[in-house]
Every structure is written in C-alpha cells, then in structure tokens.
Amino acid sequence: MTSTIETTSIDSTDCRDPPSAQRCGVVTERYFDVVEATTTDTRRNDHEGNILCASSVGYRSEVAIRTIRCVFIGAHSGGHVARCVTHGPWCASSGIAATPPGERMNGRRLATTERLIVIHSPDSDGPLERVRDVADDHDIEMAAVPVGDPIADVVDRTKETFGVTLGGDGTFFEGVRAFAPREIPFIGVNTGTLAFLATVSPADIEPALEEALQGHATVNERQQLQVTADGIDSTGINDVMIEPVPPENAFDRKITRLEVFVDGEYVGEYDGSGVAVATPTGSTGVSLSAGGPVHFPKNNGSLQVIPLHTHRMGVRPLVVDATSEIEIVSMSAANLLVDGGRAQTQLDADDVVTVSGADATAKIVTTSYDDDFFTSVSEKLGWSVREDRDDRGSHELVADRDTGAIEGADLLTRAQRVAEEAARSVGEPLRELHGETESVEHKSDAADVVTEADYKSEKLITTIIDNEFPGHGIYSEESVAKEADGEYTWLLDPLDGTGNFANGNPNYAVSIALVENGEPVVGVVYAPETDELFSATVDGEARRNGEPIAPTDRDRLEESVLLSGYDPDGSFLSHCYHETRGVRRLGAAALNLCYLASGSADAVWEYDTYPWDVAAGVVIARAAGATVTNRDGSPYTLDFDHDARNDLLGTNGSLHSSLVGHLEGLDAAVPASGD
C-alpha cells in the first residue's frame, strides 16, 4: 500500500496497553511514549496531529500504515504522553477506506445551503426553471451551467454549495468531474432516457430538493479511480479499459498481452481482449458484460480487475481495496480509455499504467424520491429475483431494526438523535477550519478563522434544530437565536474551547443540550478531532460512540486526577495539586465533564459556569453516575440570569464529600477577595 506518511525522531515504536491510568491523568485507548512524527496526508493536509505507530502486532511501515489521532495532555518522568484514538489505515494515499469514522459529509449540512449550481443538458429548460423556483423559495442563489462548460466562475468557496445535474448519465458524469474535486455534494435528475446514476424523476424535482434542503437527505460517497500513464493522468467514476489497437486488416488477430501487479505482487499475464479496472459504480457497465460481479456502490471503497475474454479459462475477476496500487504493463501497443473514452491515449510496448482509488470521491445526495440501486438494477438489467419495482420482500421484518429512525420516538429520544446528527454534521467544517488556524501568519487572521468556525457551527446546528422542532427556543453562547413557545429550549455552545481552536490545539468540542423548564434533559458533546460523541438523556444511559460509559470508583484523593476549568488566581491548582495525583486543565468545560463521565478523570472543578458551557456535560455526567453539585454540595442548577458566580463540582461520587471538605479548606486558606 502506498502511503504519504514520513516519520521523524521516533524513540519508541512499541504500541502497548495503558501501563497506568493515572500516569498522565486520562484513561484512554492507547498510550505512546516520546513519539514525534510529521505526516503529509493527501486528504488531511497535515493538520490532524497524527502519530505513526509501527506496532509489534504486525502494523509496520513497510507492510501497512496505521495512524493514531492524538491529543497531547501531559508529561511524566519518562517523557511526553499522548492520548490517542486509533482510526486504522485512513491516512493512505487514496480510497474511501481512508476516511476516518464520522468524516463523511452529513446530509444535515445541506440545510444551510447558500448556493445551487445546476449543470443542465440542452433539453432541460423546463426542469431548470422548476429548480430555480425552489431556489427562489428558499432565498438561495442559483447558477445554471450548460453541460460541458466549466463551473469555476460560479463557485464560491465561502458559501455552502449544493449541486444538481439535469440530464442523463452523461450529464451526471460531467457533474462528477466538476463537483467531486471541489467536494460539492450533488443530486442527479434524470431528464434523459436510460440512466443508472441520475435517479430522481423530473416529476419529483420539488419534493426531492425540499427534502435535501431541509437536511433530511443522505450523502453517500462513490469511489473514483485515478489512472496515470505516459500521456494521461485522469480520474474516472466508472472504469478504465485497456484493449487491443484495432488492426488495419479486420481479419487480423485482435489480442493484447498485459501483465498485472497489485501492490507490487505479480498477479499474472492476461492474454485476450484486454483488462478493465472498474469502480463499484462501474460494476454495472463493461465489468458486468465481461462476467464481473455487481458491487453495491454506496460508500464502497474497492476496485475490481476484470479480464476481457482472456484465453485462459480459469481467470476470474479480482477485487482489491481502493488503497491498493494496480500496475498494468502493456507488452504491446494498446488503447487506454477512461469512462468509455472521456479520456484516452495509446500505449506503446512496455508502458506501465497505474490505477488506484482517487483521493476525491463523488458525494452523491440521495433522497426518498430516488430509485434505490437494486430497483434500478432489477428493472434495467432484467433481474428475475424480484417480481416488479413494488416488490419489497419481507421489508417489515428488517426495516428500521438498527437504523436509528426517529419518527414516532418519544420526544427526548428524538431530540437526542437530532442533536447527535447536528453535532456530527459540523465536524467536517470545524476540522477544515481548525487546520487553517495552523497555517495563518497573523493573529488577526486566526481570529477570523475562529469567527467563521463559530458562525458556521452555530448556523448549521440552529437550522437543523429549528427544522425539526420549530416550537422550541434556542439559546447560543454567541446570541439568542429564538425564544421558546413552550417549555423546551436548546442551549448551544457551537465551539467550546475557542482558545484551543485558535491555537491549533485539538481540545475543542460542540455542546448541545435540551432544557425542559430549566432542567437539562438531553446532552450531546462532540469532539471533532478525536471523533468522540458523548450522549445521554436524563433518564437514559450515557454513551461514548454508542458504548456505555461510567466514572471511576476511586475514593482517595491522593490516587485521583482532577480537571480544572478557569482558576483565576491559581488557588485551586496550588491547593489541590500536591494532595492528588495531579490537576489538569484542558480548556473546554464540556469535555471536562465528559471525561469525568467516561472515567478519564476522577473529578472536575469549574470556578464559574454559563448554562451553554455545561448543560450538555451535566446531563452526560449525571447519567453516567457522576455527582454534580455546587462547591458546598448543594444541587447544581443552571443560572440563566448569571447574577452571581455559579461554580460547579463534579466527581465520581466516591470522592465527593472529600472534595467538598477540601474546597471548604480552600475558602479558609484564600481571602474572600480572591474569588
């Protein structure tokens, strides 16, 4: 597998289980001693803080690459310690498999669309005007581009953009070519005849677009392939074919000899009519006609090598991961065609063709008005395994078993799911902007990036919540967005840990809480850089990425690690540091409470709090079994007026009385003016 990672100064390459949960204050998946690395990642632009681990269990740099997304949190006598979450081989040079969990574009993000770009075929004037009407109804800018014309002049990278193609599969291909490199999601409306890719009927233009612009569509990725050879460097969504050059005499032999290698391993020699390398999307084209399998194309990061009428009976199609590098050596002159000839060249003897998954995937928007893949295949390929397009099988036995459907659920469950989707939807834009803070040269430029991040995150979350719960109030750290019609209000911190974000530190989060008559009842906190989603309802179970969490059971201060928020005069740190195993400050109140809830710390102290900073974390911590009060042990409540300081003490429960007494000692040791 080809990787673009380079490592420097790795003093210890052994990946081992946590030797001591208290050594750096946070219990996590993996610990690494004194590791420094630089990464050049074609997908992430070297701003993830990734650490290469050449593990003793087989993941070594010459065999495979495994990257770890890390947050550096402390030091000990042996050197630095990093808190790391393993994401697998997602830092490879290409392929959908290279996308870390939670990284795919979220359909909810379409709710903040500011511009539509429509690529249309010549005979699509009527549908084009209907799309324009939808854009006008939503006060969205729209640019219409005839198929074949460039879109560069109408692309505004500062605006959330949604693409539409009007035509058949040919227009859809042009949409892939134009939108995929710019990571613009798009939907295909079939105004042509036979189409596998553009799957929305013209009759459904309005409801399909409405569904997408409400944030209810999904965004699926389609793998592309990258092909390079002498005279060509091209990207395709379907396939690349290498076939014989037609002889001058039609009765002469029409064969070619090709040697195929995968990741440097020799597969064999293919004698016959050539070879095709297809994506899952292209599996219903040339691949299928040559006996290749049909691949479900949504979010499928694979490629298949299909022999075209070889002279050896035992040859079968070969499926490889999209991160693999396929090399094909032409032993004689041959023609190379990408996507049926949209790019082509002629190969000479001994030319080498390299094919792998492309870095850019096509982001395809799918609504409930699209024909699903297997319905299209059944109708257009004449499959006999279904009676007709309305044949759904025993759909009621499998539908919504584990899909997270929220329709019909109780309010808190539904609110929790919407909050989770909203939090994840801002992960990608925040990660993108977080990377920009590390590249700016001036402080004012970094401040502009942070302002944009706050704005984008807040706008997306408030739009999603308002679409789903129009009667609920919404309060954000940045502004009062909307007053409530009833007892429910949402509290948002679209960027908790702003200072960390501005300085390229990965300890930042998104915090979303639902409050019922002043009491927090739903809490969701998402940390984009580590892809950790913490979630709970007031009467439910606290979870991190779907797995239950619980606080520690330590009952001795000297064995415990504390997390501190704002400590204006340092009195908490100085008073508690030598009495405990350590005091850490991460700079994000919501994360502090989540780390308490998940057992990564034993207690949390906040000198002062605002409702939007801690409401979600309080729900999560309490649901996990932690105790959250004021410093004197009285119940902690949200203070919306903030007439006075509202401190917070959260512990694993076992330590609570000890820490309340300890804070009373702090009051005696520090003059009242120190508060």
Image: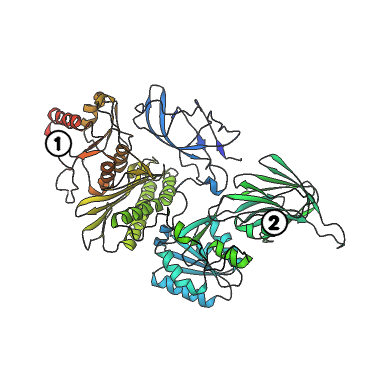
Which one is nearer the viewer's eye here, 633 or 645? 633
Where is mark 1, residue-wise?
632
Which one is nearer the viewer's eye here, 140 or 334? 334
Q: Amino acid at mark 2?
A: Gly
How many neighbours does mark 2 have within 10 angstroms: few (below 14), some (14-19), or many (20 or more)? some
The picture places residue 308, in percent across and down from the top left corner, at: 74, 55
Query: Residue, x 71% and y 55% (percent of image)?
Result: 241
Q: Earlier in the sequence, mark 1 or mark 2?
A: 2
Which one is nearer the viewer's eye here, 414 or 529? 414
Give the quarter of the figure containing the N terminus.
top right
> Quick check: 589 above or below 277?
above
Q: Amino acid at mark 1?
A: Asp
Rendering quarter of residue 568: top left
Instruction: Decide if residue 451 is on the left or right side of residue 17.
Output: left
> Quick check: 563 above or below 489?
above
Where is mark 2, residue-wise?
291
Instruction: Decide if residue 448 is on the left or right side of residue 555.
Output: right
The picture places residue 211, in percent across and down from the top left corner, at: 42, 66
